[in-house]
Image (cartoon, grey):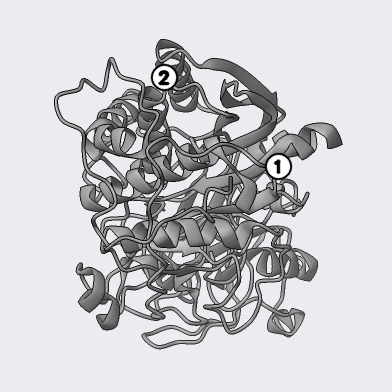
Amino acid sequence: MSTVAALALVPAGAAFAAPGGKSCDNQNNNTVAKLLACVDADGAMEHLEALQAIADANDDNRAAGTSGYEASVDYVVETLEAAGWDVSIDEFPYTYVGPSTLTQLTPVQAEYETGPYTGSGPGDVTGTVIPVDLQLGLGNTSTSGCTADDFAGLDFSGPADIALVQRGTCPFADKALNAEAAGAEAVIIFNQGNDTTDARNGLIVGTLGGSDIVGIPVVGASYEQGVALSQAGSTANIFVPEPESRPQKNVIAEKTGVNDDNVVMAGAHLDSVQAGPGINDNGSGSASLLELAENLSKLEPQNTIRLAWWGAEESGLIGSEEYVAELSQEEQDRIALYLNFDMVASPNYIFMVYDGDESGWLAPAGVPIPDGSIEIEKLFESYYTSVGEPYDDAQFSGRSDYDAFIRVGIPAGGLFTGAEVIKTEEQEAIWGGTAGASYDPCYHQACDTIDNVNEHALDVNIDAIALAVLAYSYSTESVNGVEGVKVPGGLRLPEPAGPEGTIGGNAGGLDPDLVGEDGHHHGPHETE
C-alpha cells in the first residue's frame, strides 16, 4: 500500500504519542510513535560532541584528505558496527591541496588567513597586486572579473602579476578563468562587503566547480583584507602547495529488507571545510543519521535501508558523484529514492524542504527533477504541519549530494536550515532568531563549533528524518510505484499547510555546497 496515499488526516501536533515505559536500547522501533520517541537532539548532540573532539585533536577541522576526516570515518564506522549495521567503505580518488598562505608585503606587511579555492592550481607567486573593476563600500553591486572586458587596459604582462577580484554576480570560476586568460599568474578573490554581515565581509573560500579548473593559484580573502590589498603599490605573496593524491572514503551502511531490490537511501556529507570543524555543516546531518541508525538497530524493514556518509562534498560533491558513477544501471535502478540532509541545525534557522515541484521559485533551477520527488517533498511538508512548524521551499538546485542521484533519474528530497543568506524581518517573525544575520553566521568558518547548533531545529529535523526513512522502509509506492506493506501502527499526517513564501525567487533557499552566485551549501560550498 502507498505510504503517503494512506495518510489519515489528524490535527497538527497530534500525530505521534510517545509510548511509555520502554527502553529505546532494547525495543524494536518499528512504528513511527516508538521511533520518534527515541530519536532526539540529545542523542545527536553526543555524536556532534565526538566530531568536535575529533576536530580539536586534528588542527580544528575534519576536511577531506586530513587526519580529522580519517578519524571521523573511524568514528562513524565504529558507531554503525556497534549498532549492527552492515558497513562498507567506498574509496574514491581525491586530490588534496594543503594549507595555503597569503602575505601582503607593501604598502603594509601582514599575513592573512586564507585557503585555496577548489580547482586552484599550485604556485608560489610574489608580485604586484592589480585590482580588477572593484566596487568598494556598502550597497555595491560588484561584477569584478565576470567578463574579459574587466581586464582590458590592465597590464598583466609581468612575470608575477596577481589579479585582485571581488566577489559578486558570477561564479568564482568565471573570475579565475578570465584572470588567467588575461595573463595573471595568481588570483585573490575577496568578499564583497556589500552589507555589514559576516557572510559578506569575512574570509570567503569557495570552489571553482571541480579539480584543475585553472593552472594558477587562486586563494580567498576577507573584504577588509581585499581593501588593504587594493591600495596603490600593493605587493603580495601567494602560496598554494602542489596537490597530492589522497584517496578518500564514503561510509555506506545497509540493513537488508525483505525486498532487497528496492533500496531507500539517505545521506549526509561527513567532511568539513579546512577553515573549521564543520559541526553544523555538516556534522548536523551526519549526527542525525547516526542517531537514526542506532535507533533502527533492531528493525527488520520491508525495503532495504542504505545510509551514506559522503566524503569530499566540500570539494565539489566528489564522494557522492563518484559513488553514483560507479553503480551499474541495475544498481541504480534498485535505488527507489535518495534523501539528503545537509545543514539541518543552523543557529538562525528557517525550516526548508527541497522544492520538488519548483512551486516556490520564479524560474526553474535547470536541473532534472525525477518523478516522485514531489511526493517526498509532500511527506516532509506534512510532517512539519503535523508538529505545527512553519516551513518554506529550498530551491531544488542540485547543489548538494543529491545532484548525482537526480541526474540518473533517482527521485530525491531533503531538508535544509540555511547557510550564508540573511534572515529577513518577515522570517524572524515566523521562526524567531535574528533578522539581518545569516541563517548560519559561522558558515564555513572556524566558529562552526558545537556552539553553532540550534538544538530545537535539530530536534525537529531528526524526527522528520526518522519518519521519512521509516515510512519509506515499509513502502515507496507513492514515489516509484513499488508496493510495500502498511506502516505498523499507521502513518497519520495532515495535508501540508503550504510554504510560507518568504523566499520566492531569491537565494535564501539555495543549498549551500556548490556553484553559482549566492547560491549556494554548499555545499555546501559556494562559487561566486
**Which mark sits nearer the N-terminus, 1 or 2?**
2
- Residue 273: image x %, image y %? 47, 43
* Residue 410, x across and y down, in percent: 71, 49
Image position of 263 (left or right of 298): right
Residue type highlighted by circle 1: Glu
In the image shown, does 390 or 36 lie closer to the viewer?
Answer: 36
Q: Is residue 525 visible?
A: no
Residue farthest right in this picture: 329
On the image, which quarter does residue 184 sit in? bottom right
State the SS at label 1.
helix
Task: Tell me whether circle 1 and circle 2 mark residues in contact (CB < 8 Å).
Answer: no
Q: Residue at x 41, y 80 (%)?
A: 501
The residue drawn where x is 54% and y is 35% is 473
**Residue 288, image x and y in percent?**
37, 37
Q: Around disc 1, counting alpha carbons within 10 Å, would you say few (fewer than 14), some (14 to 19), or many (20 or more)?
A: many
Mark toward the viewer: 1 or 2:
2
Direction left: furthest residue: 21
- Classify 10 Å Cα crowding around label 2: few (below 14), some (14-19), many (20 and above): many
Q: Amino acid at mark 2?
A: Ser
Name the quadrant containing residue 516. bottom right
Report how far apart the C-alphas of labels 1 and 2 lie in the structure: 28 Å
Of residues 158 and 102, the one drawn nearer to the viewer in this rendering: 102
Quadrant assignment for the N terminus: top right
Question: In the drawing, what numbered circle is on residue 321?
Answer: 1
Name the residue tied to disc 2. Answer: 297
**Dot 2 lies on which element?**
loop
Image position, residue 52 (x, y; %): 30, 31
